[in-house]
Image (spheres, coloured by chain):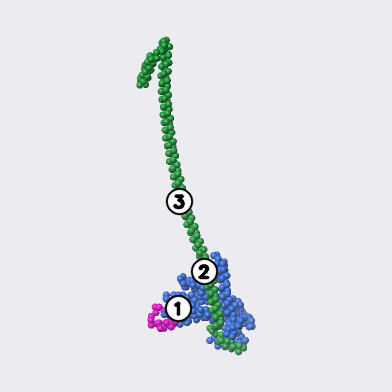
Chain colours: A green, B blue
Amino acid sequence: MISTALIQAAEYEDANPLFPNPWEALVAGLGFLVLLFIVYKWIYPAFEQAYENRVEAIEGGINQAEEAKAEAAALKAQYEKQLADSRAEASALREEARAEAAQIVAEAQEKAASESARIREQAHAQIEADRAAAAVSLRADVGTLATQLASKVVGEALDDDARSQRVVDRFLADLDAEQVQGAAQ
Amino acid sequence: MRGPALSSLALSAAEEGGFQPPTISETHLPEIFPWMEPWGEGFGKNMLMVILAVVLIAFLFMWAIRKQALVPSRAQFLAESGYGFARNTLGRDILGEKHFKPWVPLLFTVFFFVLFNNIFGAIPFLQMPTFSHAGPAYAMAAIIWITWVVLGFRLHSVKFVRLMTVPSGVPKWILPLLVPIEFISNFLIRPMTHSLRLMAVMLAGHIIVMLAGSGAEFLITQQEGIANTGLGIVVLLGSIPLYFLELLMMVLQAFIFALLTAIYIQSSIEADAH
């Protein structure tokens, strides 16, 4: 028992914890370097890549939202402009139509007026012509009829054309004069 | 220094067939494949755990990020949180927005390599933090020390030594005293403290766990009397908060080790700034 304790004490002196086992040091150092290589080659890039991807996704999402917003604003502006344009166009068209309508009405009125004037003119001319024709025909017929009537009344033939003509003319001239006087009065 | 006192204690206890505390030698388990025996050591548990850590970290992180999903799964989220911690807290916050990118792999690897190897100490059956052995801790500190020095010389050439040893704004007469202190502190003591801090905390935690375990076992199974059994149970219960304290220490030490790595690299990058 004593000897074991002594041996243990001796071993205690031997196993100085500060004295390294070189092989353990070598294995630990190599292990660390191998791990460092693995980390450098695969783990570090993978984690950084994942981090990058996430940053990109988040920032990309924000950018996309902003882009969509800008696009919507542009579209809205475009639509508003189109709407204003079409409104202006409609009002211009309305204005034009109104002007056109007024022009058409004016033209129609003018045309109608000129037509009616023409018709009136024509009618006047016709009437005048008819009156003149009637007057001529009457003048001839009234002479004849009056002569015949007179001859029948007088009972003698008043065939002497020259004389009867003179009588008729005188009579008619008197008649005309009377008429003029009547009209003057 | 504890040797004689402990041996006399063990001596008196051994006479009564008493408790023999576990020794540091017991933290070195027998080799699994003793094929390197002629050159000193075989293939031990410690080495196996280093390889396990490398495989686990590489596999877990590559598996978690395999899809690079925009909406991460739970595993990917967890892995990204861990990666983000190394990248942002250790990298960006200390090295600055301008310089941190190329150092992310190193800081990530340092943090998770140390963290996994520490956590092994809290996992049943593995139950040994790799860095409770001095060798791996020295190796890690050496790699980081070399990185720090090489980087310093590449960025500032020979001026780097002056930048690291001559503090600015100090009266001239004090420099002969200060320069050797600064040189020893920065170039010699720094890697020692860097590694020993980790190793000592892990070893202490490991020994405490072993001590509590073997002590409780001894009190319960080897000793007579209800009082001793009760004491053993109390020790066992007491070891539970100790376990969680150890867990905290494991994470904290991994963080401190990686944080110091970042701070050393930062001191190289911006050596001329202060």
CB-based contact (under 8 Å), mark 2 and mark 1: no
Q: Nearer the viewer, residue B165 or A108?
A: A108
Q: Is residue B17 left or right of residue A44?
A: right
x, y percent for residue B175 = 40, 82
Which residue is located at x 47 percent, y 57 percent? A70
Q: Is B30 above or below relative to A67?
A: below
CB-based contact (under 8 Å), mark 1 and mark 3: no
Mark 2 sits on what residue? A48
Which residue is located at x 59 percent, y 84 percent? B37
Magenta stretch, main secondary structure class:
helix
x, y percent for residue A160 = 39, 13
x, y percent for residue B168 = 40, 78
Q: Amino acid at mark 1?
A: Phe
The residue segment tinted magenta is B167-183
Q: Amino acid at mark 2?
A: Glu
Q: Earlier in the sequence, mark 3 or mark 2?
A: 2
Q: Which mark is residue A81?
A: 3
Local SS, label 3 = helix
Q: Which mark is residue B92?
A: none
Q: Is A114 above or below relative to B253?
A: above
Q: Is residue B213 left or right of residue B266?
A: right
Mark 1 sits on what residue? B153
- Outermost residue toward the bottom in this view: A3
Quarter of the figure with residue A4: bottom right
Quarter of the figure with residue A5: bottom right
| Distance from Cα at disc 3 to Cα at disc 2 | 48 Å
x, y percent for residue A48 = 52, 69
